């Protein structure tokens, strides 16, 4: 018996009978279920409730499922959306995936199949925030003036013109997904689909079904034939993110796909040919994994045809200023704020930070700064104040050294204030400040803090702020 699912689902369908039956099914599986009959009602509910997965019909009066998907992508880019349709064709699946859907399921739905899709979506939703790709079209990883990034862009442009597999390497947050999209957009395949698959988010069985698709009856929950990401990417580009995390079992099947451009769906015997351009990415040291025997050497060479290294932000500090100004402009407009200006001291404070999360971390910090600051002038004090509110993201700045001859600290001033108690006090105040700045909109507050809505709700409960 499969273990109960844990999480909250928003079910959006204008058919009361479908909502009732599917809602009861999801509830029996252990899920907390919320329902909406229209797209606008769903969006309003998302602003109030901590939802982990959205399941929406495609054809609804007013706002369609695809339109709802677009709205969710703009406001909650990390929230998985599954679309329900009575017209399950590959073109519709491609359209849904290109629009950002996590998965699609067919009507009339099969109990095991819909639970299988939701289980996959929950795995994605539970992925640590730090490992997720940056959201939105204005992530800005290629904004800058450094020679390092100029070389990367020139190499990507040359790679895009061909068909060879590209391997993007670099730390998390350096913009590997944006680089993959840049290769696709500049290639002769730009009119075809750009299909993404995050390899680290799924266990072997789910990863194989996502990659290759499956035939009816291939496993419990496979009620109909379903195309995989390889099939959906035919004529376009398949982006395999975190390729270094796949197991030897999947590596064998992927090697054959790369060599022969052919595969079988799970549970099937028919060999299918595909015309796909592969772009892969990883933050792992693949050479070490090869030496340790956990990553196949032949697969490594198949992937490493055109290697492109994306430098960390600390290796191109001259890009911090243009990136910060770009993000200030983007997030000021997005949040309805007037233009912001960084003082020289404010900019120097930003440039002094190590930014271990790279461009993604800088972007998240600037968005919080835009919303939480009075503006429009961002001084060094304002930047430092916000840095001190984010102890889990950027190390707290050390206290200034005492002035020679100045008054000594009072004995016992820090008595009773352990590091843990100070951390909790700072974290609680950061939650209070974010909720206040967001007008008690918890979704916006979570974005300002750089955490998921589920994490925000857990923190609010922990500190008695619910």
Image: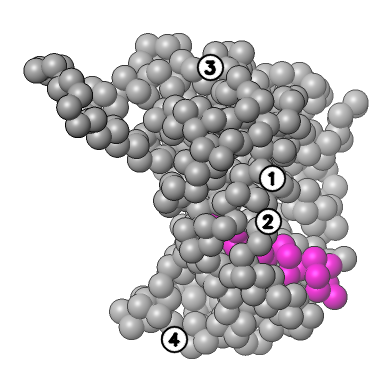
Q: Which residue is disc 3 drawn over? A: 435
Q: Residue at x 72, y 25 (%)?
A: 337
Query: Residue 225, located in which quarter of the rendered image?
Result: bottom right
Label 4 secondary element: helix
Q: Which residue is disc 2 drawn over? A: 143
| Nearer-N-terminus badge (2/1) | 2
Query: Residue 253, located in which quarter of the rendered image?
Result: bottom right
Which dot, 2 or 3, sits closer to the camera?
2
Q: Which residue is disc 1 drawn over? A: 326
Query: Residue 49, located in which quarter of the rendered image?
Result: top right
Q: Which residue is disc 4 drawn over? A: 297
For the residues bearing labels 4 and 1, Cβ distance under 8 angstroms: no
- Cα distance in 3D space between marks 2 and 3: 31 Å
**Residue density around tag 4, few if under 14, some if 14–19, many if 20 or more, within 10 Å:** some
Image coordinates of residue 145 in percent, x first then y, are: 66, 62
Q: Residue at x 43, y 47 (%)?
A: 353
Whether residue 460 sits left or right of residue 122 in the image: it is: left
The magenta-colored residue range is 173-190
Rendered view: 435 above or below 22: above
**Residue 46 within the magenta-colored segment of the rendering:** no
Q: Residue at x 57, y 79 (%)?
A: 307
């Amino acid at each position: 018996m499969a273990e109960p699912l844990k999480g909250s689902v928003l079910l959006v369908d204008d058919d009361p009978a479908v909502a009732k039956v599917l809602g009861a099914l999801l509830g029996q599986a252990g899920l907390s279920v919320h329902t909406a009959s229209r797209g606008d009602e769903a969006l309003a509910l998302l602003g109030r409730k901590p939802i982990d997965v959205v399941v929406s019909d495609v054809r609804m009066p007013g706002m369609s499922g695809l339109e709802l998907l677009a709205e969710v992508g703009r406001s909650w880019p990390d929230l998985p959306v599954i679309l329900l349709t009575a017209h399950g064709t590959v073109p519709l699946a491609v359209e849904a995936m290109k629009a950002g859907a996590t998965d699609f399921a067919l009507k009339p739905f099969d109990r095991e199949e819909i639970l299988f899709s939701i289980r996959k979506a929950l795995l994605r939703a539970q992925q640590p925030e730090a490992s997720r790709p940056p959201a939105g079209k204005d992530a800005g990883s290629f904004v800058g003036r450094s020679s390092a990034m100029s070389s990367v862009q020139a190499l990507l442009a040359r790679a895009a013109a061909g068909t060879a597999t590209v391997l993007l390497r670099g730390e998390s947050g350096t913009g590997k997904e944006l680089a993959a999209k840049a290769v696709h957009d500049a290639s002769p395949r730009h009119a075809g689909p750009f299909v993404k698959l995050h390899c680290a988010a799924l266990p072997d069985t789910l990863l194989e079904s996502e990659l290759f698709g499956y035939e009816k009856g291939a496993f419990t929950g496979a009620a109909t034939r379903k195309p995989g990401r390889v099939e959906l990417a035919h004529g376009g580009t398949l982006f395999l993110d975190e390729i270094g995390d796949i197991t030897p079992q999947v590596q064998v099947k992927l090697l054959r796909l790369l060599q022969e451009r052919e595969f079988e769906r799970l549970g099937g015997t028919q060999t299918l040919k595909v015309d796909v351009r592969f772009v892969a990415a990883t933050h792992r040291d693949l050479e070490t994994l090869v030496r340790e025997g956990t990553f196949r050497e032949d697969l490594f060479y198949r992937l490493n045809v055109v290697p492109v290294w994306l430098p960390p932000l600390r290796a191109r500090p001259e890009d911090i200023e243009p990136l910060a100004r770009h993000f200030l402009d983007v997030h000021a407009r997005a949040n309805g704020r007037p233009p912001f200006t960084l003082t020289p001291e404010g900019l120097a404070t930003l440039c002094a930070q190590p930014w271990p999360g790279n461009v993604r971390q800088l972007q998240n910090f600037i968005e919080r700064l835009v919303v939480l600051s009075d503006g429009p002038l961002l001084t060094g004090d304002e930047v430092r104040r916000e840095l001190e509110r984010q102890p889990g993201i950027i190390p707290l700045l050390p206290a200034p050294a005492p002035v020679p001859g100045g008054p000594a600290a009072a004995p016992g001033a820090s008595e009773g204030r352990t590091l843990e108690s100070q951390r909790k006090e700072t974290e609680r105040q950061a939650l209070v400040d974010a909720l206040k700045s967001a007008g008690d909109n918890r979704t916006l507050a979570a974005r300002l803090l750089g955490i998921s809505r589920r994490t925000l709700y857990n923190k609010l409960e922990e500190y008695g702020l619910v």
